C-alpha cells in the first residue's frame, strides 16, 4: 500500500515542483521531425519509488522527458 501511494505521489510532486526541468512547457511545440528517435521512458512503480527516495533529480528528468514527448505529439 505504501509503495502504491508513493507511486502516485511522484507525478504529483513533479507537477508541483516548478523546477527548471519543466521550462520547456511554456515553449511552442516543434514540427513532427522533433520526434525522431524520441522514445518514452517506462519505469515500474517500484523504480519510481526508489528514484523519489534516492535520486529525485533523475525522476524529474524522466518525467520531463516523457511530458515533452507527449506534448510534441510523439505518443499519446
Image: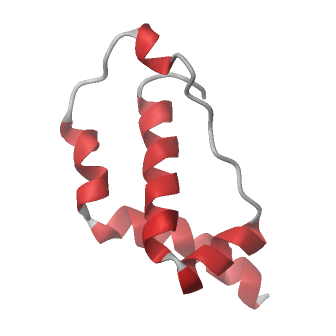
Residue 47 position, x and y percent, is 71, 70
Q: Is residue 32 above or below residue 7?
A: above
Towards the viewer: 65 or 6:
65
The residue depicted at 55 percent of the width and 27 percent of the height is 38
Q: In this view, does 9 lie to the left or right of 44?
A: left
Residue 71 position, x and y percent, is 42, 31
Give the image quarter of residue 43. bottom right
Number of numbered markers: 0
The residue depicted at 54 percent of the width and 23 percent of the height is 74
Q: Is residue 72 left or right of residue 62?
A: left
Residue 40 position, x and y percent, is 62, 38
Q: In this view, does 47 lie to the left or right of 31?
A: right
Q: In this view, does 30 lie above or below 76?
A: above
Residue 10 position, x and y percent, is 54, 71
Towards the viewer: 6 or 66:
66
The residue depicted at 60 percent of the width and 28 percent of the height is 76
Q: Residue furthest bottom?
A: 2
Q: In this view, does 72 lie above or below 56?
A: above
Give the image quarter of residue 57. bottom left
Give the image quarter of residue 1. bottom right
Q: Which colour scheme is used?
A: secondary structure
Amino acid at each position: 500500500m505504501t509503495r502504491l501511494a508513493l507511486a502516485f505521489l511522484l507525478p504529483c510532486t513533479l507537477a508541483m515542483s516548478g523546477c527548471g526541468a519543466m521550462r520547456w512547457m511554456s515553449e511552442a511545440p516543434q514540427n513532427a521531425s522533433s520526434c525522431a528517435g524520441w522514445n518514452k521512458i517506462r519505469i515500474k512503480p517500484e523504480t519510481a519509488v526508489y528514484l523519489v527516495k534516492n535520486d529525485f533529480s533523475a525522476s524529474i528528468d524522466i518525467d520531463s522527458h516523457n511530458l515533452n514527448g507527449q506534448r510534441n505529439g510523439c505518443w499519446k
